[in-house]
Structures are given as structure tokens and as C-alpha cells.
Image: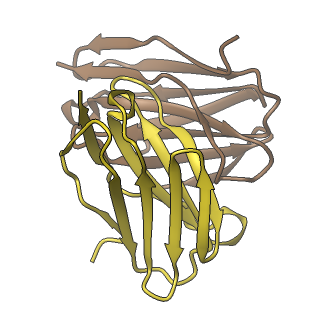
Chain colours: A yellow, B brown
Amino acid sequence: QKEVEQDPGPLSVPEGAIVSLNCTYSNSAFQYFMWYRQYSRKGPELLMYTYSSGNKEDGRFTAQVDKSSKYISLFIRDSQPSDSATYLCAMSGDYGQNFVFGPGTRLSVLP
Amino acid sequence: DTAVSQTPKYLVTQMGNDKSIKCEQNLGHDTMYWYKQDSKKFLKIMFSYNNKELIINETVPNRFSPKSPDKAHLNLHINSLELGDSAVYFCASSLGGDYNEQFFGPGTRLTVL
């Protein structure tokens, strides 16, 4: 089993749809959970950063962490064509231990 | 102002050559990283430097050698290039040891022929 798994997609949705992106992981020591967005031919950029279990909202984006299930999600409301990118989850233990990226999900939002 | 910059953006070279990729950050960060992103888009950490000292060295061939002349620069030198080295290499930086909030450069696309 890989340490972090993510549906590779591609995921295609119409503009305005709600998008759900998910990661599962196996290391119960992970405490910090991130979502990065990577546009084509660009470097990843941090989108959301959460600690431990719970929800965090930032505009159209909501990150959820369920440590008991080892499952994290990113929801995008009212998706826009500009949201078309690859979304990578990332996670680590305390002090950045075992920091790792998921393989990424490619999202296309169609106008 | 560019926060994390890399040069060159594209690098095409023959097998067996030696090449370097340069990275500079103007964010005042203490920690810098090199990542390799393969054709399947999987992003894997190679090295991490904190204040010019190596703190992570994942299992990469000895042909790869990072060099940090100061905390704003982390260069990657690759000897005896192989076909499998073809990938996009990303430099990143973060404040202190906070791996979680990393700022990435635009990447260097290396093609080995």
C-alpha cells in the first residue's frame, strides 16, 4: 500500500459544479495536511493548510480531515474554469517528519 | 518580484553529460528543497537544506549533488546524466523548518537524449 493515495483523474466537471477531491493515507503519525494546486508547467502553490482533524474554509474552498478514517478532502464550490489544475494533497508529522505529497488529481472545469 | 527562481527553465542534453540547475529565493527562508516530478506527475523530495546544511537526503543516486553557497541559494549538480533523469526539477523554500508551507519555483524541465 502506498503511503498516500489519490485518485489520479482526470476529473471533468461543468462550471459551477461542486468538486470533491480526496486522499487516503496509511501513516497515523501525520498531523499536518495540506492541499497544493499546480497549474500546467508551473510549480505547486499552497492552497489550504490544516492541523489534525476538522474543517477549514477559505472562500470557495473547504478542507476536511478525518484522522480516524485517515481520509482528507478538498471541496471546491461554484467551480470555475480557472480552477482547472492538478491538486496535490500533502501531509507530515510533527516538525515536518515524513513530509510527502500525494500523486495528484487532474481537474478540468469546463465552461 | 520572483520569490523562488530557477535557471535554466529548459535543459536538453546528451547522456553522460554533467549539468547544473540553479535556484535562488528572496523570501529570507532558512530551508530549501529539491524535488523531482516524473512523467506521471509524482512529486518526490530529493534534498532539503537548512541554513546551508543538508538535513534530508532521500535515496537518490550519488550523481546528484546539491550545493548551497548561502541560505538563499541551493544548486543541483548532476553528473553522468542518464535517460531516467529526464523530469521536471522543482526548487522550493520554507521559513524555518516548516515543511508544510513551501514556496515553489517554476521548475526546470530536463530532457536527456
* Residue B60 in view of the camera: no
Q: How many marks?
A: 0
Instruction: Note whether A24 is above or below B112 in the view shown.
Output: below
Q: Percent position (x, y) of residue B49?
A: 68, 43
Above or below, A24 relative to B26: below
- Return the x and y of residue B91 as percentages of the image width and height: 55, 31
User: Going 34% across and 21% down the picture, which residue do you hit?
Assistant: B109
The quarter of the picture where the N terminus of chain A appears is bottom left
Using the image as rendered, state which of residue A64 and residue B13 is in the foreground.
Answer: A64
A1 or A87, nearer to the observer: A87
Residue A1 seen: yes
* Residue A45 picture quarter: top right
Query: Would you identify the image quadrant in which residue A26 lies?
Result: bottom left
| Residue found at the far bottom of this picture | A68
> In the rendered view of the protein, which quadrant contains the C terminus of chain A?
top left
Residue A13, given in percent of the width and then of the height, sits at: 21, 43
Side of A38 where B73 appears, left or right: right
x, y (%) of residue B54? 68, 47
Q: Residue at x 40, y 39 (%)?
A: B36
Q: Quadrant of residue A24?
A: bottom left
Seen at 32% across and 40% down, the residue is A16
Q: Is residue B31 above or below residue B78?
A: below
Please tell me which residue lies in front, A68 or B42. A68
Horizontal relation, residue B18 to residue B96: left or right: left
Instruction: Identify the residue shown where x is 26% and y is 29%.
Output: B86
**Left or right of B97, for residue A19:** left
